[in-house]
Amino acid sequence: MTLALALAKFGATVVVLERNSKVQEVGAGLQLSPNARRVLNQLGLDKAISARSFEPRAIDVYPYRAKRPVVSLELGAIMRERYGVPYSVIHRADLADLLYRACKRFANIDLLFGIRNFDAVNHARGTSLVIDEANGANRSARVFALVGADGVRSETRTRVLNGPEASYSGYVAWRTTIAADLLKDVLALDRTTLLLAPGYHAVCYPLPARKQVNVALFVKTKARELDVPPKEPKLPWAALPSKTLETIVRLAKGGWGYWIVDTVDATVWSDGGVGIIGDAAHAMLPFQAQGAAMGIEDAAILAPLLMTEPDASSAFQRFGAMRKERVERVRNISNFNGFAYHLEWPFTLGRDLVLKAQGPRGHLKRLDWLYGFDAAPEPPVPPPERVPKAAEGSRP
Ligand SMILES: Cc1cc2nc3c(=O)[nH]c(=O)nc-3n(C[C@H](O)[C@H](O)[C@H](O)COP(=O)(O)OP(=O)(O)OC[C@H]3O[C@@H](n4cnc5c(N)ncnc54)[C@H](O)[C@@H]3O)c2cc1C
């Protein structure tokens, strides 16, 4: 939907094909970093996001069993000061809903739900698309481009582009939301809490617009254990007691969603008029909270290319050339975080010393290249035309 909005702004006609029968978002919260927010603001969504999101003051990092955070990474006001836009958190369903409403305002965006199947073929004069609609009817059309933003298990990648299947990352995410009232004595509700431990970590942040707290618990899990998904989180912390986490698990009362974290390493992102963006192209570990942000950036960068390049094939080629290095860099820091978050004693001692030494603003210096990135810079305002001053005594 971000891509649809970015294209519609240029006057393109866009059809969004969605498999689900309506806008629905599983899971819970999403951290929206400044690089993503900047794009969404440029699409006119600032107020709508502000109304439903929350700006945590900091990320408090708790090593295993620590009673106090080893560091409190500043967010809040400093993010606005430094990057001109906030670092916020929002419920996924709220973001999906406000994107949907924004799309509905454009006469040149059509949203088709309940798509059962699709196929695309490149030929000399463009790309042909066939879709099976919810009511069983099928439609075909010649299109300028088909952009697969169909997620980690993208059929555009695997079936149309003959690309690789997603691979299991070794992690399972358990997600839930808990009434904020219940957690007011357990977590500081003006900020994000990151609980680290050998073999698992948890990220908790408030979603005040819904009076809830989002909890995502990431657990290292062997691939063979995935065949029979457990009904409840498998409790690695039973062997590693953490008071805060035990309380969270008790309060969640089993209301967890189970999400196998897969990643995608596709070298080919396009063929002719068919291309992929977002998780379909480069799903990564969520440990820098950047997967959706990368997809949002993708949309902002691909849209003007599709509007200005002579054909979709060259738009996709240029897009790949512009994106791959940055996406890889983000993937690498996400992998590194996964390694550092789950370290075991005594290696945790070194990690915690580094975290402490970097201090509350260390992450900003380290991540300026990430958060300060502007995927859709406004064209520079041309200087006012110089009118030569009339020479004294001459006629105007
Ligand atoms: C636990 C967890 C926490 C995360 N936290 C963050 C975070 O804080 N910040 C962040 O930036 N990222 C985060 N991520 C990553 C983020 O969720 C993903 O990167 C993001 O959702 C990818 O967006 P997407 O649009 O590419 O794909 P998706 O969100 O997967 O959307 C794909 C869409 O395509 C549709 N679709 C799929 N197949 C078809 C088909 N055949 N026909 C029609 N429609 C189809 C789906 O129904 C869906 O609507 C997290 C991920 C996890 C697992």
Image (spheres, rainbow, N blue to C red):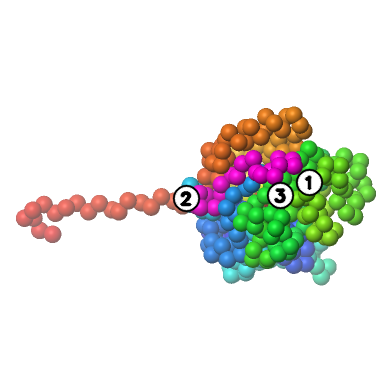
Image-based side of 168 in relation to 278, left or right: right
Neighbour tally class for label 1: few under 14, some 14-19, many 20 plus, Cα within 10 Å: some
- Residue 78: percent from the left, percent from the top? 50, 49
- Residue 41: percent from the left, percent from the top? 53, 58
Q: Quadrant of residue 13?
A: bottom right
Disc 3 or 2, which lies upstream in sequence? 2
Disc 2 or 1, which lies upstream in sequence? 2
Q: Residue furthest left?
A: 393
Q: Tag 2: residue type? A: Glu
For the residues labelled 1 and 3, the Cα–Cα distance comes to 14 Å
Q: Does label 3 point to a residue whose CB lies under 8 Å from ligand 1?
A: yes
Neighbour tally class for label 2: few under 14, some 14-19, many 20 plus, Cα within 10 Å: few
For the residues labelled 3 and 2, the Cα–Cα distance comes to 25 Å
* Mark number displayed over residue 393: none
Q: Residue furthest right?
A: 228
What residue appears at the point 65 percent right and 55 percent down from the top-left corner?
A: 188
Are the two marked residues, 2 and 1, in contact with CB atoms closer than 8 angstroms? no
- Residue 148: percent from the left, percent from the top? 71, 52
Q: Tag 1: residue type? A: Ser
Q: Which residue is the site of mark 2?
A: 81
Which one is closest to the eye, mark 2 or mark 1? 1
Q: Which residue is the site of mark 3?
A: 203
238, 329: nearer the viewer:
238
What residue appears at the point 81 percent right and 54 percent down from the top-left corner?
A: 249
173, 142: nearer the viewer:
173
Q: Write down the region rendered in magenta.
A: 62-81
* Quadrant for the C terminus in the image: bottom left
For the residues labelled 2 and 1, the Cα–Cα distance comes to 36 Å
Q: Which residue is the site of mark 1?
A: 242
Q: Tag 3: residue type? A: Val
Could you say whether the residue bearing mark 3 is in a helix, strand or loop?
strand
